[in-house]
Amino acid sequence: MRSCEVSSLPRKMFAHLLKEVIRAGICTACGACVSACFVNSITIADDTPKLAGPCLRCGFCYNSCPQTGGDEIYGMLFGESKPGPLGVFTKAYKARAVDPVIRERGQDGGVVTALLKYALEEKVLDAVIVAGTSREEPWRPFAKVALTAKEVIDAAGTKYTPPYMASAIWDAVYCYGAEKVGVVGTPCVVRGVRRMQHSPESALKLGSRVKLVVGLFCMESFDYSKLAKLLEESSVSLSEVTKFDIKKGKFIAYRGSEEVFSRPVSEMKEYVRGSCKACTDFTSELADISVGSVGTKAGFSTVLVRTEVGSRLFARAVEAGCIEAVELGKLTSVEKLAEMKKSKHGGH
Ligand SMILES: Cc1cc2nc3c(=O)[nH]c(=O)nc-3n(C[C@H](O)[C@H](O)[C@H](O)COP(=O)(O)OP(=O)(O)OC[C@H]3O[C@@H](n4cnc5c(N)ncnc54)[C@H](O)[C@@H]3O)c2cc1C
């Protein structure tokens, strides 16, 4: 049993999460509730958080959820700074990994992988949570605690369905004894993790072990079962796919350099997760550092450095020769997509 003090104040708990978020169809599958439950009672079954043990009514799960709050975190991280369409950031870069193996394995410039590998090797972090996959269910991602450079490199590349990233924070801390954890995630994961770090009624003790939050740009993510079925109907075997990508408005699956599936994203609405339809954050505005594809040419990543933590680590990785980076002036295409997501989905 996880040890922690529980206040006797009446508060919202798993039953409220179930009603307001899970049954309402807006669960982001970030996994924060799973880690936040200090008696380990929340599990993921059939792609949904479920109560599998006693609920002690601590409210940590409810108060870690990115859908039940978190707007106040903006001020906690960035003070009075007025966010533009990309949130608050100090510098933007066009960047890529220097290591050709990481460049080959990475989705775009391999910046996320190079940064996490550097952070592990330099002991800035002792565990990072990445999106792993298994042979049993190809391309179904899971939150993997990576402790070595090899494990980080093996998890490179984008998986367009959610891996419940924050669910592995508990494992990293209590199974692997990590003191300094890094997490990668889409905007919803970033918000959940930030709540665990900063929201007064959340799992702050666990959240305090998170020392780096890398955010990915994200327009939307897809439901694994629906996507797998769509590909099967198109005679594409998931085990043969070597990469998925979204390019010029199309969702594409590759086998090596061959396109085996391509469909306009505008025709994929029924496969998009319900929670994405209300999300207004394209660039992971609460992250320490955000990385995406749009805004730079193929083979590079666009990087937004936001916090002191993100800025220091990125500068060190560049100085150490792990990442090459050139400062970006205009971010017109990124701003356009960020504004589009905000106007399409309304206020968070
Ligand atoms: C669902 C989704 C939608 C995206 N949509 C856009 C978009 O519309 N526009 C855009 O510019 N960029 C988008 N991205 C980001 C883009 O695909 C790349 O992840 C980003 O450019 C980083 O590239 P890289 O080569 O630096 O990363 P890599 O070096 O390949 O590292 C990627 C890291 O992210 C982890 N990861 C992979 N999938 C997930 C996941 N589902 N959840 C959490 N972590 C994961 C990997 O394990 C790895 O650690 C999206 C990413 C995701 C996951």
Image (tube, grey):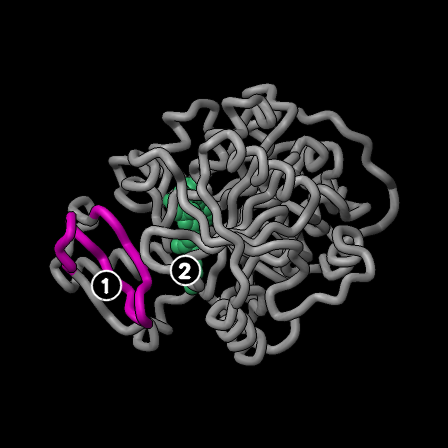
- Mark 2: amino acid: Thr
Q: Label 1: which residue?
A: 230
Instruction: Name the residue located 45 percent from the left edge and 42 percent from the top edge.
Output: 324
Q: Does the magenta run of residues contain 258?
A: yes
Residue 262 location (% of width, % of height): 21, 66
Which residue in the structure is indicated by mark 2? 296
Nearest the viewer among 155 and 26 is 155
Residue 210 part of the magenta segment = no
Q: Quadrant of residue 24?
A: bottom right
| Residue at figure coordinates x 56%, y 42% from the top left | 166
The answer, for residue 243, to whether it is visible in the render is: yes
Q: Is residue 163 visible?
A: no
Image coordinates of residue 329 in percent, x first then y, are 54, 63
Neighbourhood count class around disc 1 (C-alpha, 10 Å): few under 14, some 14–19, many 20 upward: some
Q: Which mark is residue 76?
A: none
Residue depth check, mark 1 versus mark 2: number of the one nearer the observer: 2
Determine whether the residue tagged by mark 1 lies in a helix, strand or loop: helix
Q: Is residue 253 above or below residue 183?
A: below
Q: Is residue 155 left or right of residue 181?
A: left
Relative placement, left or right, of 124 versus 208 is left
Q: Quadrant of residue 5?
A: top right
Judged by its main secondary structure, the magenta piece is: strand
Give the residue at x 55% y 45%: 214
What residue range appears in magenta? 242-260
